[in-house]
Amino acid sequence: LDAAETVFAARGFDLAKMEEIARSARVSRALLYIYFKDKNELHAALCLRGLDLLRQRFAEARGRHARGLDQVKAIGRAYIGFVQEFPVYFDALARAEAQHTELEDEHSVCHQIMRAGQLVHGETITALLAGQRDGSVRLDLGEPLIVAMTLWGFSHGVAQLAMTKGEIFAHQGVAVTTFIDHAIDMATRSIAR
């Protein structure tokens, strides 16, 4: 997986070849195919690794704050940091999100990725509920899963813009960090009590 991450980062998913990944991992191509039947399966394994890392980051961010609202804000920052630090995982996950086959099959890779994503959302839901209990998050937000998914969509878009439009922002006199700070503050204010 480390080799695949390196090759995907250098060449992109579409141009990466299994033989390059095997060479980078210092294993034979045949051995690589014993572990992963094709590049899509390797891609899915990277998604699962990325989601586990993201869940850990969210849990750590949440654990550094007592108030639920502060936990949600920290999770937003953790997501942006994850995207900036691990663009290969971000790209892999964005590619996987475009596919939604075999969700009903519990043993499918798509289902496993969906379950791992639910665990990530669970961290945000835990922070939202904590905030409702401690009075820092509004009680009228509605279903916590939908709120978590909405915050994720917002953060995902902000991260994507920060990664791809930095030069345009700079040309208009807006630092990417200022844009990120403003976006996270805006999202946080929308749920604050």
Image (cartoon, helix red, strand yellow):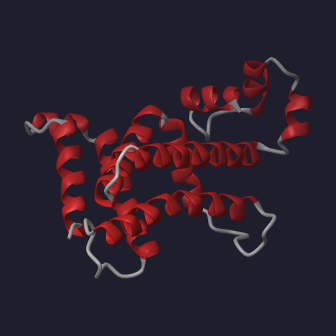
Q: Residue at x 31, y 78 (%)?
A: 141
Q: Residue at x 70, y 71 (%)?
A: 103
Please determine whether, in this image, residue 25 is positioned above or below residue 53.
above
Relative height, residue 123 to residue 40 (above, below) = below
- Which is nearer the eye, 165 or 61? 61
Q: Is residue 15 above or below residue 187?
A: above
In the rendered image, the quadrant that contains the N terminus is top right
132 sits left or right of 192 in the view: right
Give coordinates of residue 74: x percent, y percent: 34, 48
* Residue 53 picture quarter: top right
Which residue appears at 42% of the width and 50% of the height? 62
Vertically, is 103 above or below 112?
below
User: x, y (%) of residue 44?
Assistant: 69, 49
The quarter of the image holding the C terminus is: bottom left
Q: Residue at x 55, y 50 (%)?
A: 93
Q: Position of residue 55 (x, y in %)?
A: 54, 49
Quarter of the figure with residue 77: top left
